[in-house]
Amino acid sequence: MLLRSAHRVATKLFVHESGDRIVDRTVDRVQVARTVLGALATIGLILAYGVEKDRWNNAAEAGFANAIVTPFLLICAGPLVILGFIYYAPPHLRPHLRSRLRAPLKAVGWFLLSLAVVAAIIYFVGSSGVMESKNPWLVVPVALITMAAIFWGLPFLFLASLYSARSAFNTAHVHPMLPPVVTGILVWLLAIFNLISEGMPAGPPVAQFCSVLGGPLSVTAVSAWEMWRLRTRYGVTVRG
């Protein structure tokens, strides 16, 4: 029940559809297939070069960390990409593109507000010592709020992170080409972040190459194909 409620609210806030937004189910299916194949490739590498408990734990932790870090990388790098995209457009189209920034900005605002509220509640309860009070009129409401933040707020934030990363904070409302462009840049930033934080994975050079570059290269290929499909099938160009 709580997960369904969190999913419904996250969908309402972070998945925006508009009448002029291009929805291509073929692209969606290819993206899902790439994600599944990427997960299977990761499992295959772990099975081939060791099945120690630590490797499975590290893979799970890395996947969860990527889901959390991705929106923050989007918030940092996304505005630069969008500004460059708008600047690259013909001068007469720039005001129109700027006028369509409301949906991405709204999604970013809701994400930051949700994160701040949940973090503030957990930090306040953990540092104030209010749960040690013997006053039930104080402890009971705080306990209920804390449980809501943990069992509803944290799943909501995780779903919000997934939806925000998948839609690149609804940047398709600005221009249909923006999601694949932002995704292509983001995946390389995420690969650099993982390489700095975790270093090279274990295994022979071929396995290391596949682990580090397989994901970014496959995502970049799908993004390039999506841009080609937008141009050839729908007549959308980067400057159009």
Image (cartoon, rainbow, N blue to C red):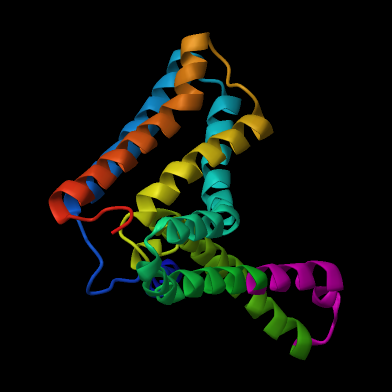
From the top left corner, tell me how far across and down residue 23 is, in percent: 21, 60
Residue 230 vertical position relative to residue 95 in the rendered view, above or below: above
Q: Residue drawn at (26%, 45%), measured in percent from left and top?
A: 226
Q: Which residue lies furthest to the bottom in this view?
A: 137
Q: Residue drawn at (53%, 33%), measured in percent from left and top?
A: 59
Q: Residue drawn at (38%, 26%), measured in percent from left and top?
A: 41
Residue 62 is left or right of residue 234, and the answer is right
Q: Residue furthest top?
A: 204
Residue 108 vertical position relative to residue 63 in the rendered view, above or below: below
Q: Can residue 209 be seen?
A: yes
Q: Residue furthest left?
A: 233
Q: Residue drawn at (58%, 32%), measured in percent from left and top?
A: 58
Is residue 134 found inside the magenta-colored segment of the image? yes
- Which one is in front, 150 or 79? 79
From the top left corner, tell me how far across and down residue 197 is, in percent: 67, 34
Residue 131 is left or right of residue 184, and the answer is right
Q: Can residue 15 be seen?
A: no
Q: On the rendered image, what quadrant is the N terminus found in? A: bottom left
Name the quadrant containing residue 98: bottom left
Name the quadrant containing residue 147: bottom right
Is residue 163 found inside the magenta-colored segment of the image? no
Q: On the rendered image, what quadrant is the C terminus found in? A: bottom left
- Which one is in front, 182 or 70? 182
Q: Predominant secondary structure in magenta? A: helix
The magenta stretch is 117-136
- Which one is in front, 102 or 206? 102
